[in-house]
Image (tube, helix red, strand yellow):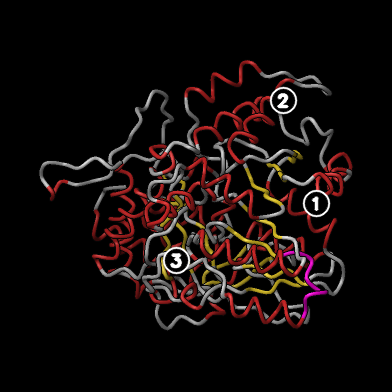
């Protein structure tokens, strides 16, 4: 339940926690920021954290742990086999999801590797509401093809549909009717990362799973952003308003064949997991864990992280815990939208998403608007966001560029990390940048890896726009950082 302020004009998000451990931050000067972003090849992934003031790159592995999570890590049992830590994690997964079988992995993309190795053969297809970078990379690596079936509203930045991550059910039915034998599995992403963290409704998930079950096709849910999706189901889907989060989780596990997730997102820890209710599925996938990850009791995870994951999963069932991220994101989106900054609406999970194509109207795709805006925001405020546009795509097999449907700059809001004043600082610097957007120019490749290039590719600015942007900052802010 949200807390209302007596004076409506004073209504702001209220943190339902207190800060007991702090980490000092450093804000370089604007001149230093120009230097640092170019040393990083204009790729925010390559910035050093010591040079970042607000790290809004991701919510993966950077969420604040609770006191109970930190305490749980002291009881870790690092036995190679028969570990009590593994048993406690199995118990947590059973209680939270209702599943019987668990396979550990060192993180979410390791789960994606196992699923691709087990089920995807050359020429097969994997329909999904929208792709995620590493999921797509693993599927295409083994010769498969991703087919995106997100609803039309999912690609419309200002559409008010509360569940823009829904499948287009008609297109899914048509694909099943025409290519059923080619489908390795259908992947459902709860909280579609690359289109603004937009949720999928329970009604849509049910319809997808029912359609697949009748056709004999396995369904796989990526639950990495499940906590945000749970929140949106509770507040946007009326029939679930009074249903407990635990019952919603169990209902999801009942309808699908496999669930996997990264605990760097779900559970505020490290590691990953594949869970299922079906023993044959468990045995199909089991042999891949010792081959790629580690023994079945840890799967490449450090045992203290497993203890923290178990406690973090229990906390996922606490509405006051899972609401903090979406509420802060909604506040930031409204603040920027009210100013006129083109935002993805409605506010989703994971972070606030700026529509870079509209922000930098007229900039061609081949100058990478989202990447340019990410570099510009670092110069403007020492804020590290993440490009979620064409740089995050990969080239077609013939070498031609595949331009993203949406050019987004993601401003992730790690859970229980930022204060409201820091969120307001971010909004202030984005507003200044928007007023000076005509100064922002494009980027071009210097070093372009062939796979997952957004992680470690390097680019350079076209012209001297970054120096001109820094000069304008000095004119407007004087000696201020």
Q: Is residue 35 above or below residue 161?
A: above
- Which of pointers 1 and 2 lies earlier in the amino acid sequence? 2
Residue at (58%, 75%) from the top-left corner?
A: 169
Quadrant (top left/top right/bottom left/bottom right) for the N terminus: top left
Residue beneath disc 1: 114
Q: Is 420 left or right of 250, judged from the image as shown?
A: left
Decide which of 151, 292 is in the foreground and name it.
151
Looking at the rendering, which quadrant does residue 298 occupy? top right
Whole-number angstrom distance, CA of label 3 to CA of label 2: 46 Å
Residue at (54%, 51%) from the top-left corner?
A: 225
- Which of pointers 1 and 3 lies earlier in the amino acid sequence? 1
Q: For residue 183: magenta?
A: yes
Looking at the rendering, which quadrant does residue 96 occupy? top right
- Count of number-bearing discs: 3
Whole-number angstrom distance, CA of label 1 to CA of label 3: 35 Å
Report helix, strand or loop for mark 1. helix
Report helix, strand or loop for mark 3. helix
Q: Is residue 371 visible?
A: no
Tell me where residue 384 appears, x and y as whole percent: 47, 52
Q: Is residue 418 visible?
A: yes
Q: Answer few, some or many: residues within 10 Å of disc 3's Cα (few below 14, many 20 plus, some between 14 and 19).
A: many
Give the label, 1 or 3, closer to the camera: 1
Decide which of 400, 154 is in the foreground and name it.
154
Q: Is 263 left or right of 354, judged from the image as shown?
A: right
Give the label, 1 or 2, closer to the camera: 2
Residue 373 marker? 3
Magenta stretch bounds: 179-185
Whole-number angstrom distance, CA of label 1 to CA of label 2: 22 Å
Tell me where residue 50 appears, x and y as whole percent: 50, 40
- Which of pointers 3 and 2 lies earlier in the amino acid sequence? 2
Residue beneath disc 2: 87
């Amino acid at each position: 339940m949200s807390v209302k302020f007596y004076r409506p004009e004073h209504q702001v998000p209220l943190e339902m926690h207190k800060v007991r451990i702090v980490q000092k931050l450093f804000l370089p000067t604007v001149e230093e920021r120009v230097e640092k972003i170019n040393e990083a090849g204009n790729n925010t992934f390559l910035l050093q954290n010591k040079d970042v003031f607000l790290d809004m790159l991701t919510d993966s592995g950077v969420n604040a742990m609770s006191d109970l999570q930190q305490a749980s890590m002291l009881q870790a049992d690092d036995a190679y086999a028969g570990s009590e830590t593994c048993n406690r994690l199995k118990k947590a997964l059973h209680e939270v999801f209702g599943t019987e079988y668990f396979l550990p992995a060192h993180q979410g993309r390791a789960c994606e590797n196992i699923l691709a190795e087990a089920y995807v053969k050359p020429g097969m297809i994997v329909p999904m509401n929208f792709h995620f970078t590493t999921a797509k990379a693993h599927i295409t690596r083994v010769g498969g093809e991703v087919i995106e079936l997100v609803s039309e509203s999912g690609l419309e930045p200002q559409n008010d549909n509360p569940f823009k991550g829904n499948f287009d059910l008609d297109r899914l039915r048509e694909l099943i009717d025409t290519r059923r034998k080619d489908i390795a599995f259908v992947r459902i992403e709860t909280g579609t990362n690359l289109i603004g963290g937009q949720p999928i409704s329970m009604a849509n998930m049910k319809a997808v799973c029912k359609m697949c079950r009748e056709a004999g096709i396995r369904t796989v849910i990526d639950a990495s952003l499940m906590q945000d999706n749970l929140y949106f189901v509770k507040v946007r889907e009326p029939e679930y308003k009074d249903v407990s989060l635990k019952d919603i989780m169990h209902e999801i596990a009942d309808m699908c064949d496999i669930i996997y997730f990264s605990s760097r997102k779900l559970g505020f820890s490290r590691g990953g997991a594949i869970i299922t209710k079906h023993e044959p599925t468990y045995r199909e996938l089991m042999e891949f864990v010792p081959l790629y990850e580690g023994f079945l009791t840890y799967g490449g995870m450090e045992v203290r992280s497993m203890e923290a994951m178990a406690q973090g999963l229990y906390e996922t069932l606490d509405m006051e815990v899972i609401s903090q991220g979406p509420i802060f994101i909604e506040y930031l989106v409204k603040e920027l939208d009210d100013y006129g900054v083109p935002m993805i609406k409605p506010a989703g999970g994971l972070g606030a998403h700026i529509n870079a194509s509209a922000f930098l109207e007229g900039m061609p795709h081949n100058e990478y608007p989202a990447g340019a805006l990410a570099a510009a925001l670092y110069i403007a405020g020492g804020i590290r966001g993440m490009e979620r546009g064409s740089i995050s795509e990969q080239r077609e097999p013939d070498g031609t560029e595949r331009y993203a449907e949406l050019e987004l700059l993601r401003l992730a809001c790690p859970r229980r990390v930022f204060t409201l004043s820091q969120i307001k600082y971010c909004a202030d610097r984005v507003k200044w940048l928007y007023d000076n957007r005509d100064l922002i120019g494009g980027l071009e490749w210097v070093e372009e890896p062939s796979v997952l290039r957004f992680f470690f590719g390097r680019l350079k600015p076209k012209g001297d726009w970054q120096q001109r942007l820094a000069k304008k900052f000095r004119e407007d802010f004087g000696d201020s950082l």
